Structures are given as C-alpha cells and as structure tokens.
Image (spheres, rainbow, N blue to C red):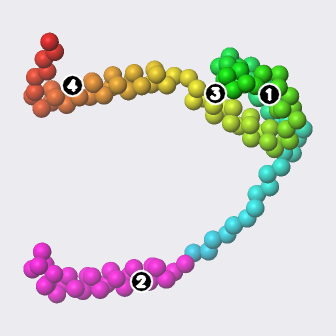
Amino acid sequence: MAMVRKAGWFVVVAVMMAGWMGVLGSVRGVAEAGVIASTLSDAGSRVEDMAKVQAFLENKVVVQKLVDYGVSPAEAMAKVQTMSAQDLHRLAALTDRAAVGADGGVLWFLISLAVLVILVIVIMKLMNKEIVVR
C-alpha cells in the first residue's frame, strides 16, 4: 500500500476527487416546504370513524382490557362520542393498525422458527456435514 501512495497517479487522483467533492458540496439544491391542510371536509367521515371505533370497542379482547383497567365499555363509548372530529379520526386510524397487529404473533414466530431450522439443515447438508438426531 505504501508503494501505491508513492505513485504519482495516486496523488493526482486524490486531488481530483477532493476537488470534485468540493464542487459537488458547494452546489445546493432548492428545497420548498409548505403546510398541508388537515381538515375533515365531509361530515360522513365522522360517522365512518365512529363506526370503526365502535366496532373496535366491541372486540372481546378490547372489552377485557377495558375491564382490567377499570373502565366499562359504556364509559369508553361515552368518551369517544364527546371527542372532536380530529381526535376521533386519529383514534380510528390507530384502531386499524391495532387490529392488523393483534393476531398471529405466535403463528409467525413458529413459522419463522421452522424456516430457520430448515435453513440450518440445508446449509449443513451443503457443507457435507452429517446431522444425527438421537
């Protein structure tokens, strides 16, 4: 490596790259920013959001969690009905994400574990290693 650094072409290439990086660093792009309005335009969206939240609150797992925390489902629904449209929309969006992530955790863990075991067996076979289970 020391011999490469002593070569004349190495110094030329290093100076050219430093200069090129200086030129590229000095050129600046134009960034534009703006505010996006976050209003709910139609009154039908509140009805849709209320239906989503109500369906979520009727789930037996959610009802059990509410009871565990000392809140009755009727109290929770009363609180939801007094929410503003923006807060209700946020809650409805969160219920979509919670419903997606609520199921199948153990199943995906078992599938991942099986794929990992199969992958290890395939790699061991490719390395001509013998697998003996006693």
The question of residue 3 being in magenta is answered with yes
Give the mark count: 4
Q: Residue furthest right?
A: 43
> Hey, what amino acid is under mark 3?
Ala
Residue indicated by mark 3: 99
Residue 90 placement (x, y as % from top left): 74, 41
On-image quarter of the C terminus:
top left
Instruction: Please state which of the two labelled residues, at mark 2 or mark 3, is closer to the viewer.
Output: 3
Separation of residues labelled 3 and 1 (CA atoms)? 18 Å
Residue indicated by mark 2: 22
Q: Left or right of 42: which side holds 128?
A: left
Instruction: Please state which of the two labelled residues, at mark 1 or mark 4, is closer to the viewer.
Output: 1
Q: Which of marks 2 and 4 is nearer the N terminus?
A: 2
Name the residue located 46 percent from the left edge and 22 percent from the top edge.
Answer: 106
Instruction: Please state which of the two labelled residues, at mark 2 or mark 4, is closer to the viewer.
Output: 4
Separation of residues labelled 4 and 3 (CA atoms)? 36 Å
Separation of residues labelled 2 and 3 (CA atoms)? 51 Å
Q: Residue furthest front?
A: 70
Residue indicated by mark 4: 121
Residue indicated by mark 1: 76
**Secondary element at image label 4:** helix
Separation of residues labelled 1 and 2 (CA atoms)? 60 Å
Kindly indicate whether the residue at mark 3 contacts the one at mark 4 (C-beta within 8 angstroms): no
> Hey, what amino acid is under mark 2?
Gly
Instruction: Please state which of the two labelled residues, at mark 4 or mark 3, is closer to the viewer.
Output: 3
Asked whether residue 47 appears in the rendered view, the answer is: no
The question of residue 5 being in magenta is answered with yes
